[in-house]
Image: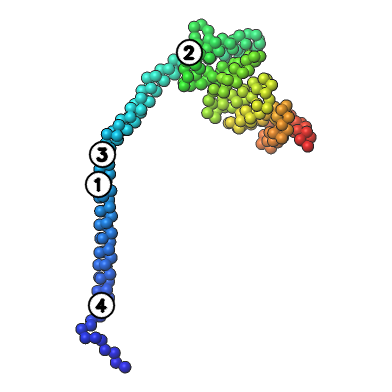
Amino acid sequence: MATYNKRGYKPKTKKEKIDNDVEEIFDESESTTAEVFSTLDEGASKTEEWVSKNQNIIFAIVGVAALVALGYWAYNNFVMAPKADEAIVESKEADKYFDLAMNSTSTQEKDSLFMLSIEGVNGKYGYAKIAEEYAGTDAANIANYKAGMAYLNIGGDKYQKAIDYLSEYDGNGSVLASLAKAGIADALVQANQAEQAIPYYLEAAEIESNEFTSPKYLLKAAQAALQAGDNSTAVDALEKIESEFPESDEKTTAQVLLAQARASKN
């Protein structure tokens, strides 16, 4: 059967179809782009308007921030820096007597020298005054540590002072931080507070974990736990020595105590 096209009908070529489609795409894209720019213009206008209305507040905030930054810089450079230098100079005399005490073989002389390092001598501050007068400096922080250790060595009725000063020391995860925590624990044990000492020993063992101090503090934690009747904690600490520090000097003692702790636990 023959097929006839309507009069005047002319089929579109492939090129015409593509051109029309492209024109439609460009028209739609141009419309979308125009809307985006219009929205951006509106947003920019609103922002400018808000800034214009609130510029006094903005300037005040910026000004305060600048003053705070300037004040912080001035405080560090003109107050704390000279203060830190002065604290170091003051510490030299206390350090001398602390070192003499550490090397002394006489208990009486040792205690006397430690007290001089704490209280001061020859017109110079001791650690107690340095910690108070130069708070915020590194020298004051170290003064807290050394005063605490001095009181710990003196012992007797000075254990609470040792705890107080060592608690003020911020070792920031260093070896001295580990020693300070263990010092607090030692003072608590000597003050018949073995149960309170356990977490300090465990923390001391974790800070800067190593083959020398960690097994030592774990063993002390276990001994304090056994003294406090906490066999479960004692077993955990002793097993850790056995598994993680098998070459340590504390292993033999740990094995003996572990057998006792397990028997008591059961």
Packing grade of label 4 (10 A; few <14, some 14-19, many >=20) is few
Query: Is 208 situated left or right of 29 in this image?
Result: right
Crowding around mark 1 (Cα neighbors within 10 Å: few <14, some 14 to 19, many 20+) is few
- Numbered label attached to residue 69: none
Q: In the image, which is nearer the foreground, mark 1 or mark 2? A: 1
In the rendering, at what x and y percent does residue 182 appear? Answer: 62, 25
User: Could you tell me which residue is drawn at 65 percent across and 26 percent down?
Assistant: 197
Report the residue marked by disc 1: 45
Which residue is more in the foreground, 68 or 81? Answer: 68
Residue underneath mark 4: 13
Q: Which mark is residue 53?
A: 3
Label pair 4/3, CB-CB below 8 angstroms: no
In primary-sequence order, the first of circles 1 and 2 is 1
Q: Position of residue 67 (x, y in %)?
A: 33, 27
Q: Quadrant of residue 204?
A: top right
* Residue behind mark 2: 90
Q: Is residue 228 left or right of residue 89?
A: right
Q: Residues within 10 Å of mark 2 (few under 14, many from 20)?
A: many
Res. 259 visible in picture:
no
- The three-letter amino acid code for the residue at tag 3 is Lys
